[in-house]
Image: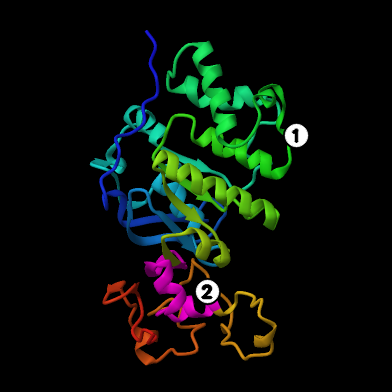
Amino acid sequence: MTHTAKAPPAPAQDEILISTRDLTKHYRIGGGLFGGPARVVRAVDGVTLDIRARETFALVGESGCGKTTLGRVMLRLQEPTSGTIRYRDTDLTDLGEGALRALRKNLQIVFQDPFASLNPRMRIEQILAEPLRSHGYGTPAEIRERCTELLEMVGLRRQYLRSYPHQFSGGQRQRIGIARALANKPDFVVCDESVSALDVSIQAQVLNLLGDLQDQLQLTYFFITHDLSVVRQFADRVGVMFLGRLVEVGTTEELFAHPQHPYTMLLMSAVPRPDPRRRGEPRPMMQGEIPSPMNLPKGCRFHTRCPFARDICRAEEPMLQTGGGPAVACHFPLEG
């Protein structure tokens, strides 16, 4: 009997497709036979987040803030330390290995490096067929037909099925990575810095492809990036992350027009300005170095770099508060 991969049911408008509550991922460092006292790296430290069906939610922040770890924990590619992850009506944190495996076809990822994410010893047809066989897609003829369909879906010719990854450019390899992620018709896709390794002109092509596929297939994207210009072009909502915590969440329009958290404002001010008339204008700058996630400062974890920090910031950590606009974790939000 043939088992074909079916697309998940069409999501309702404003349905929460995936959500987290107080999600953490801590790594224990040292403490072995010769390692001295153990320390804890708080890579993800209490993230509560709702992602709506068919939206593109972008997560931004400096390198090392926990963006990639959060994306992988949400898919349970890494196990959470605590907290919950829900996909539709299913608590992913409670699923055993068999049930999670069956659900994985709906939850996929496009990796950052198109050179490292494809097996150099496998032909493109084998790479695309692997997830299909893993989930019992159908007969060899049906799998080959689906592989051809996937290549054409991402703008590549069917003749490439017999080729190897080294015969492609970086942009073509990333298209193959996208095709592999879509093989079993998922509805939630984590894009982990999926255009950052590409030239700017190729970035635009891949982003246009992702946008077209989202419209055609009713996809929901969790788009991890450090490139704010990409976020402004591509995302519906944005979360800003600093040292394992969300410090601001809002629509793209809100955050770019009126950032309320000092960290968001400073990230925005660091984006290069193409207007020569604004050259030389003073910009606010971040102070000092990022604190270690193994030794977080007391109070607001951004206060050591914040030009607006006051005494309460050094004593009490602010929680993410929702007001009239974006949700912001700051004792003294900036006025729009």
Residue at 34 percent across and 77 percent down: it is 317
- Determine whether 77 is above or below 142 in the image: below
- Residue 265 belongs to magenta span: yes
Residue at 59 percent across and 87 percent down: it is 283
Residue at 37 percent across and 68 percent down: it is 250
- Residue 35 belongs to magenta span: no
Identity, as a three-letter code, of the amino acid under mark 2: Pro
| Category of crowding for the residue at label 2, using alpha-carbon neighbours closer than 10 angstroms: few (below 14), some (14–19), many (at least 20) | some
Mark 1 element type: helix
Name the spot of residue 12 as percent of width and height, x first: 25, 45
Residue closer to the observer: 297 or 30: 297
Residue closer to the observer: 164 or 232: 232
In the rendered image, which quarter contains the N terminus?
A: top left
Name the spot of residue 129 as percent of width and height, x first: 55, 22
Identity, as a three-letter code, of the amino acid under mark 1: His
Numbered tag placed on residue 335 in the rendering: none
Name the side, left or right, on which 118 lies relative to 304. right
- The magenta stretch is 241-268
Name the side, left or right, on which 335 lies relative to 293. left
- Determine whether 63 is above or below 172 in the image: below
Q: Quadrant of residue 155?
A: top right
Numbered tag placed on residue 291 in the rendering: 2
